[in-house]
Image: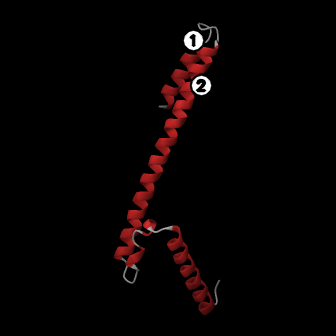
């Protein structure tokens, strides 16, 4: 893909004198670059979503297979913001309580 991009850019530059470096010649590269940027944004978002789903499945499996783990934490990503905030505060309180009893912060 990188090599093809370099080749197309070189071709565009070589055609500059043929089209007398016209506005249309410049607009062609500008339009192509804008479209490629737009498509790459969607590709990156799709890749990020896929990685996040895979990570969530791995974490769900670890929670499921760990003795003593709370199974209600599986599919935590489905909770709304208020529910997530409540869990965050609960874990902060647990951390503070354990820090006081162990003497560590």
Q: Position of residue 76 (x, y in %)?
A: 44, 69
Seen at 64% across and 8% down, the residue is 20
Q: Where is residue 41 in the image (x, y as percent from the top left)?
A: 52, 41
**Residue at mark 1:** 15
Tell me the SS state at disc 2. Answer: helix
Q: How many labels does the image show?
A: 2
Q: Position of residue 91 (x, y in %)?
A: 54, 80
Q: In this view, does 31 lie to the left or right of 43?
A: right
Compared to residue 7, the image places residue 37 above or below, namely: below
Residue 60 has which mark? none
Residue 51: name its quadrant: bottom left
Camera-side residue of 81 and 91: 81
Seen at 58% across and 84% down, the residue is 93
Residue 30 has which mark? 2
Seen at 43% across and 66% down, the residue is 78
Q: Where is residue 48 in the image (x, y as percent from the top left)?
A: 47, 51
Question: In the image, which is nearer the foreground, mark 2 or mark 1?
Answer: 2
**Mark 1 neighbour class, 10 Å CA radius: few under 14, some 14 to 19, many 20 or more:** few
> Alpha carbon of mark 2 to alpha carbon of mark 1: how far?
15 Å
Camera-side residue of 30 and 95: 30
Compared to residue 25, the image places residue 89 above or below, namely: below
Whichever of callouts 2 and 1 sits on the residue coming sooner in the sequence is 1
């Amino acid at each position: 893909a990188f090599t093809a991009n370099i080749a197309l850019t070189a071709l565009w530059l070589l055609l500059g004198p043929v089209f007398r470096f016209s506005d249309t010649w410049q607009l062609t590269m500008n339009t192509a670059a804008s479209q490629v940027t737009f498509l790459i944004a969607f590709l990156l978002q799709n890749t990020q979503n896929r990685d996040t789903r895979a990570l969530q499945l791995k974490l769900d499996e670890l929670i499921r297979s760990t003795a003593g783990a709370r199974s209600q934490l599986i599919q935590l990503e489905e909770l709304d913001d208020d529910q997530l905030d409540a869990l965050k505060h609960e874990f902060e309180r647990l951390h503070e309580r354990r820090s006081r009893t162990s003497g560590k912060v």
